[in-house]
Structures are given as structure tokens and as C-alpha cells.
Amino acid sequence: MLEHIQIQKGNDAQFHQLLDLWIPYCRETGNTESDTAIAKHARKRVAIQGNREDMHFELSFADGTLVGLCFYAVDLGGIRNVLPPNLGYIMEFYVLPQYRRQGYGTEMYRHIETTFSKHGVESIYLTPDETSGEPFWVSLGFVNSGKVDPDNHMPIYIKKIKQ
């Protein structure tokens, strides 16, 4: 069973743990910025999370070993002319390669779904990478909505969750 720890602002040890995942995650998704620039972006993400009760930036641990991260929130505004407000939005999700296909990603997702249910969310959306992420999300029941995110120009996948 995984332990999910909300990243705390000003906790340098947690921030360094985050960077151990965030930099490889960014590299894997094609980011070519310097490690310093990537760290600066991560610091901005940490600064905004936790400002609302329904925004979560978490590290996931298996028996004390860091295996993944997830950043998710209730999208209060929706996407104008695309999605209504109050859907759950998974912004970032990453499992280190050596821990994939061991059930950790699925367990992390179930934790996210449970958390969203507690916030009253009925559906979750995300924009998966079609090579590595899309098969995983489809296996969990996400469906291509036929809509495209105007910010990243990627297809939006949606899943209705059980209350």
C-alpha cells in the first residue's frame, strides 16, 4: 500500500525528493530546459499547491521508497467552451520507470479518485501522452472526449467516477 504525502511549502527535503522525480519526468516528456529552469518551475508548482483544500501535489512512497508524484485539483473554472467547471483535473502524474507495471500507478490513481470523490467531483479529465500515458489511462476507464485542450493542444480524456 502506498503512502501519499502532500508536499509542504518550505520543506527542502521534500522539494529535493520532488526534484528526483520532476526532472526525469520533464525529460521523459520532452522538456529540454536546464535542470535549474525545471527546478524553478517545480518551485512555482509547490508554491501554488495547498492554497486550496481541493488542490494536491503529492509524493507517493512504497515502503518508504519514493515511486511517483501526482498533481491534481478540482478545476473550478473549467475550460471555456470546452469543459464545465468542477471536474477533477490530473495535471501531472509520474511513476519512475523502474516502478512501472507493478500496480503503483493504478494505486496512485485510485487514491486520486477517492480524494476527488470526497471533494464532490463526478468526473475527472486529463490530457495523456499518446505513446506512454494513453494506454494506461484507457485501461483505467478514461475515454477520449473528442475535445482538445486549447492550452496544450492534446486530446482530453474523461472518466466519470462512482460516488
Image (cartoon, rainbow, N blue to C red):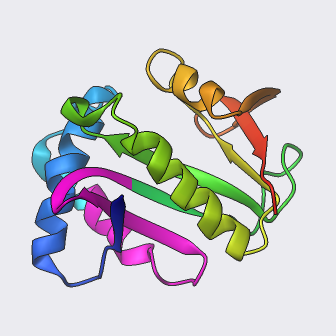
Magenta highlight range? 41-69
- Residue 67 as seen in the image, left or right of residue 119: left
Q: Which residue is at 31% across, 25% downward?
A: 30
Q: Which residue is at 18% across, 82% downward?
A: 11
Q: Which residue is at 71% across, 33% downward?
A: 141
Q: Which residue is at 54% across, 72% downward?
A: 55
Kindly tell me whether residue 153 is visible in this rendering: no
For residue 11, above or below residue 74: below
Kindly tell me whether residue 163 is visible in this rendering: yes
Residue 62 is a magenta residue? yes
| Percent position of residue 108, x then y | 45, 52
The image quarter in which residue 16 lies: bottom left
| Percent position of residue 61, x then y | 25, 59
- Residue 33 as seen in the image, left or right of residue 155: left
The quarter of the image holding the C terminus is bottom right
The image quarter in which residue 53 lies: bottom right
For residue 109, above or below residue 99: below
| Percent position of residue 116, x then y | 66, 66
The quarter of the image holding the N terminus is bottom left
| Percent position of residue 123, x then y | 79, 53
